[in-house]
Image: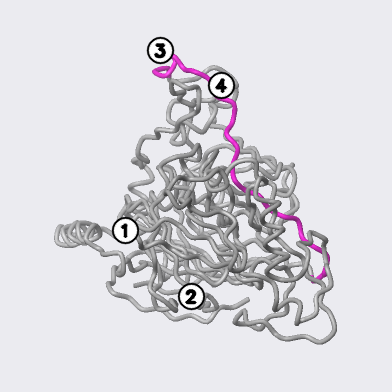
Amino acid sequence: MMYQRTVSFRKHRNFCVLCCLVAFMVIPPSSEKESFPRRRLSELEQPSFTISEEERNLETLPRNRRLVLIDEDNSSTLETSRHKEPPALSRRLAGLRGATTDVENEELSNQRIKKESFSAETMEATLTVPLHATTGTHHVHVYIGSPPQRQTLIVDTGSRLMAFPCKPCNNCGKHASDYYDPVRSTTDVLPKCGNCYLAELSTCLNADQKCHLKQRYTEGSSWSAYELEDLVWFGNSNLEESTDSFMRLAVPYSFGCQIEETGLFKDQYADGILGLAKHETSLIQAMYDAGSIRNNAFSLCFTRTGGSLSLGGSYAQQHREPMRFSPLATTGSGKNMYSVNVVEVRVGDICIACMSTDHTIPEELNIFSSGKGTILDSGTTDTYLPQMLEEPFRKAWKEASGMRFSKRNHESYTYEAFQRLPRITFVLEGMQEDNNVVHVVEPVAYMEDVPTDANGNVIPWSGTAALTNRIYLEEQQGAVLGANAMLGYDVLFDIGGKRVGIARADCSGSTSIIE
């Protein structure tokens, strides 16, 4: 799929690129009408243990041990040191980007200072790239190494690591792209035991001296990998443009070179995953630290078939209303998650979780802050609400629509019946008192297979249409606002500002823009 391209530059830098053009085979999504697998890509913590100060200072760690710090209540904490750029890769990166003069370095320093002064309404993105979606999951094109090799990755705000198959991988599936080949890259660096950049997430094995990673997800899938570092940057489907225009934003970054995949990771269309959780090992953090993006932030704007990812801020030109902001929650166990404070939930006009008149927090509202809290998780296709709200939710649904709440796949709906389905409204705590954020999830977003045009507008139908409700009432603690709750909105994840921003938006544009 070729994207329309509009490229404008606010500044120019000469750089030298050593690359060769390669062709990429893309596996088209299935055209079958069957329901696709539901994805839940919130990561699960690995087993952890206390490490003595003596062991922590060793150059090599005991076999099969994980370097994870434990706090006093035995919950795992990840206090990762800043990403360290290896000298060899620093020199190669300088050659690829071109040497900078003292004047240019001063200009970059001044630009970095200005980053902190951006107001809420003018947090402009440095780069916006297109997304494409298959089976309800959104993907971005990422380029790695020199010459560049493209990988198609799931954008997942519920996990931290970037990972994809590397040659050789005997236990990996067939995906959108060829496996990344470290042998072809002239800029890759293989960290060894004692120098693992993802130390708190990896296990160092004496057998091969590699830094090994293993990640499991809520859905049951998992992968195993070893740590590798190379140049990484975002682009679009056009390799030449992604190299010539976007490579100047490349940063050296450590990722997982997968050697084994299980479950949906082995069968999926995407090559791998791009973890965007708020963590010091994230690619967003690395790009901000390197000065490639102006703010420690990114935004996601989803449609059913694609959308856009903006780096360093949001792409305000696509907004249909002013962006509203909600602070990230400070409670809950999901320290790396984008958790928000829910102050009201409505089904249609009926409030099923509301603040008491005496301003005390009732149990049905407090449940949204329990456990991991209420998280915005782009890697989860659907929305999951607390199980304790099932009875009031079903009752309100029946009262609002005149129909029972159905969880059957491919339930038959006339267009008139569809129009009676209620909006689901989440009121989130605002940055100021009496300035809460009202986030409405429309039926076209939470119902699957609704006939729509290219802009996401519902197309009326005659007879019946087979639709599936993708709201689940089964969370024991907290809630998950998945990708379907984000459709039609530009959602800003402002890591530096410790907040999220939400604005209705036209997410159908497929341009690549560098400001």
Q: What element carries label 4?
A: loop
Q: Where is residue 334 in the image (x, y as percent from the top left)?
A: 50, 40
* 1 and 3 marks in contact (CB < 8 Å): no
- For marks 4 and 3, give the CA distance: 14 Å
Q: Which amino acid does label 1 sit on?
A: Gln
Q: Does the magenta stretch include residue 398?
A: no
Q: What residue type is labelled 4?
A: Arg
Q: What element carries label 1?
A: loop
- For marks 2 and 3, give the CA distance: 53 Å
Q: Is mark 3 on a helix, strand or loop?
A: helix
In the displayed structure image, the side of residue 257 where residue 16 appears, left or right: left
Tell me the residue at 55%/43% (across/down).
Answer: 363
* In this view, the mark in front (2 or 3): 2
User: In the rendered structure, which disc, 1 or 2, sits on the residue that comes first in sequence?
Assistant: 1
Q: Mark 4 points at which residue?
A: 65
- For marks 1 and 2, give the CA distance: 23 Å
Q: Name the residue under label 1.
A: 432
- The kind of secondary structure the magenta stretch mainly shows is loop
Q: What element carries label 2?
A: loop
Q: Position of residue 171 (x, y in %)?
A: 74, 42
The 10 Å Cα crowd at callout 1, few under 14, some 14 to 19, many 20 or more, is: few
Tell me the residue at 57%/32% (across/down).
Answer: 212
Q: Which amino acid does label 3 sit on?
A: Glu
Q: Which amino acid does label 2 sit on?
A: Ala
Q: Mark 3 points at which residue?
A: 54
User: In the rendered structure, which disc, 4 or 3, sits on the residue that comes first in sequence?
Assistant: 3
* 1 and 4 marks in contact (CB < 8 Å): no
User: In the rendered structure, which disc, 1 or 4, sits on the residue that comes first in sequence?
Assistant: 4
The 10 Å Cα crowd at callout 4, few under 14, some 14 to 19, many 20 or more, is: some
Residue 239 visible in image: no
User: In the rendered structure, which disc, 2 or 3, sits on the residue that comes first in sequence?
Assistant: 3
The 10 Å Cα crowd at callout 3, few under 14, some 14 to 19, many 20 or more, is: few
